[in-house]
Amino acid sequence: MINEAIREQFISEHSRCAPETLRTRLFWVNRWLKFVGDRPLHEWNKILVNKFRTQLEKEGKAPLTIRDALGVVKRTFDAAKTAFEAERTQTLANIDPNKPSAVAEALKAISLPGPTWDLGKRDLPRPGAGEINRPALSMEQIGKIVSIAKEDGGFEPPEIAFTVLASLYGLRQGELQAVRREHIDYEAGTIFIMTEKGGEKRKQLLAPGVIPYLQKYEFTGEYSPFLMNQIFKNICAKAGIPDQRGMAWHSFRRRIETALRDSLASDPNLRRDAQLITKIWFRWRLSSSPEMTDRYYTANPLEADKVAIAHHPVLPFWKGEYGQLKLR
């Protein structure tokens, strides 16, 4: 009963997560809850967590996987504390003050400890450098992909549209899945991005020349994470890019985030903060930035978009037969 309440509390606390992120975390929540079974919450402690870790190690799980799993377990402890306090409050409310045992029941409910997370960062397994695999597409590879996307018959309409959004805006897989036709205003030249991971959900300028490519697709399809991954692999295969472990839609973002910042910083005539413009283009939430100057930055993000577009290192790949569209 309490385990189901913990699971529901966890889901409630992570309601803003991307569906795929929540699904992955719930996998480890369920693994942990199955492991602890009907143990009372006061037995949730370092000893129990280490037993769970040992089990994962015996299963051959990699240190990075175990670290991710224990990170979810820590969040499950937090959800369990909330569920525990709610259950304790309900127990106290249900005690009949007229019963002779009322005081004893109340003291028992008050004194019963809840879960205790007494592990530090040093207790978590450290993955080796070789285990952290975050490959980025090279600019040459992105150029090949864009070149084929512009060819008639090279890519299917969804492949073309997703390539535009991934190569210019660095959209994550879930963000690509979330794009709908109503999010795009072709007349105004804008697109609304449903940003994940706590980023800024906002309207962005469409870069010059890409509207005809986006219009090839109606953005009506429903794609699962598996199908989105297959689309990415198909795009790479058509461009002659070898399949590499860890290569996915985020591989666009890893390259262009660095390339855009370098492009901005290398302009001697730019009178703007290259790092800040990059953050705005990639929809970072400035209000939560540790830098006070970021948090108090009040310029219109669409103005920052114009600066980013003027320096975007991938946009020249897209320019061609359709010419340039006037920025509004």
Image (spheres, rainbow, N blue to C red):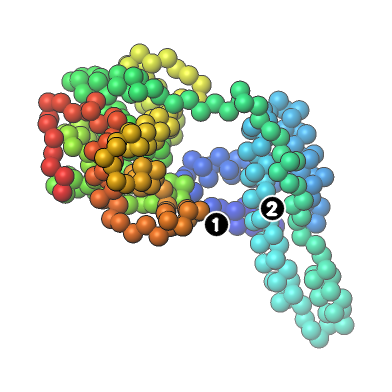
Which of the two labelled residues, at mark 2 and mark 1, occupies the earlier sequence position?
Answer: 1
Residue 90 shown left or right of residue 201 in the figure: right
Location of the N terminus by quadrant is bottom right
Residue 256 seen from this side: no
The disc placed on residue 77 is 2
The residue beneath circle 1 is 12
Closer to us: 261 or 119: 261
Which amino acid does the dot numbered 1 rest on? Ser
For the point 48% across and 53% down, which residue is it? 291
Q: Nearer the viewer, mark 2 or mark 1?
A: 2
- Badge 2 local density, few (<14 within 10 Å), some, or many (20+)? many
Q: Is residue 69 above or below residue 76?
A: above
The reply to whether callout 2 and callout 1 are in contact (CB within 8 Å) is: no
Q: Residue furthest bottom?
A: 98
Closer to us: 129 or 82: 129
Residue 80 seen from this side: yes
Q: Is residue 114 above or below residue 267?
A: below
Q: Where residue 263 appears, x then y in whole percent?
A: 33, 33
The disc placed on residue 69 is none
Q: Where residue 122 appears, x then y in whole percent?
A: 73, 41
Q: Residue furthest front?
A: 268
Q: Where residue 226 appears, x then y in whole percent?
A: 44, 30
Which amino acid does the dot numbered 2 rest on? Phe
Q: Is residue 38 above or below residue 322?
A: below
Label 1 SS: helix
For the point 12% across and 31% down, which residue is it? 323
Query: To which quarter of the image does residue 254 belong?
Result: top left
